[in-house]
Image (tube, rainbow, N blue to C red):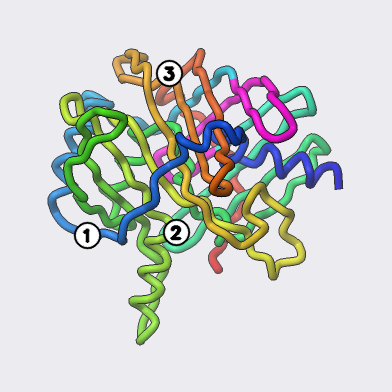
Amino acid sequence: MRTLRLLRLVSIFCVACLSASAQQAASSPPARPALPQPNAQAAPLIQQSLAALTGGSPITDVTMTGAYTITDASGTRNGTITMIATATGQGQLTITLPSGTYSEVRSISRGSAIMTLTGSDGLPHTITTQAAVSPNPGWFCPALVLASASSSDYLSSYVGQETLNGEGVQHVALWWLPGTSSGSSATSVAQAWQQATQHDIYLDASSFLPVAMNYTLQPYNPNSPNEPLVPYRGNSVSRLAQVQFSNYEAVQGHPVALHIHSTMSISPILTLVTDIQLSSVAFNTGVTINVPSLTAN
């Protein structure tokens, strides 16, 4: 039971990018609008943002390390975090806190995903597709998220020009296509998959660098007795999270947001918030991730 309680505190999306403070409810992410329809207008903006982030040199993998702070109802804890992702849809997070070391490995492909959590006891816990589909395993590296939009596994849409935190932004959305489906249920399956996997990305109107990204954190499957409780997923309620990227500096010729700040609404008066301050970033080192076998629901 202690391991499960710790996993509730340090699973990827609530530990790597989310912590709690009722006083910060005003910074909770906005409600998501109606699902956009795919259109061709997003592609040029995505390519402009990718050019700004990569200079035309593709990113195959990234390794980031830094200081990590989580604050929730039980207090504030400081630790370190290592985040690794590849262009092939794989990601790994390792978080060290006073209570121990925790890790997550995730892999995605069209219509399927798998996630394995390991607590301080060293025992792996496999999470089913429903809980593993979002966010993108490389959510902390916007270049990898945007590059995925070029894959045939994704659709994208230009939503419009908006204002975010007082600044002009271009709002684009991308989402994963579901696995093969046919018949009368195909449309509902596609809409459900879009709702689950859509990433709303906000690009600075001048530099085209990503300044924020919204995604939905999916609940775990409450009917699976072998699936451990995951933070704020076990009540079968999906929750909208927003990651903010700031303090861009050049690393190996690539602009990198050294400050990653995230919020997630838990209730009308409670918002989870975390900060990650990066101290080291390395691209294209050939790092590999030992992922679990990829399975689909």
Q: Secondary structure at mark 2?
A: helix
**Residue 89 falls within the magenta-colored stretch:** yes
The residues tagged by marks 2 and 3 sit, at their Cα atoms, a distance apart of: 28 Å
In the image, what residue occupies the spot 70% across and 39% down?
9
The image quadrant that residue 46 belongs to is top left
Amino acid type at circle 2 is Ala
Percent coordinates x, y for residue 159 in the rendering? 21, 50
Amino acid type at circle 3 is Leu
Image: 24 above or below 180 = above
Q: Label 1: few (<14), some or many (≥20) within 10 Å?
A: some
Percent coordinates x, y for residue 80 in the rendering? 63, 21
Residue bearing the label numbered 1: 38
The image quadrant that residue 195 belongs to is bottom left
Residue bearing the label numbered 3: 258
Q: Label 3: few (<14), some or many (≥20) within 10 Å?
A: many
Magenta-drawn stretch, dominant element (helix, strand or loop): strand
Q: Is residue 7 left or right of residue 132?
A: right
In the image, what residue occupies the spot 44% across and 28% down?
62
**Residue 108 falls within the magenta-colored stretch:** no
The residues tagged by marks 3 and 1 sit, at their Cα atoms, a distance apart of: 31 Å
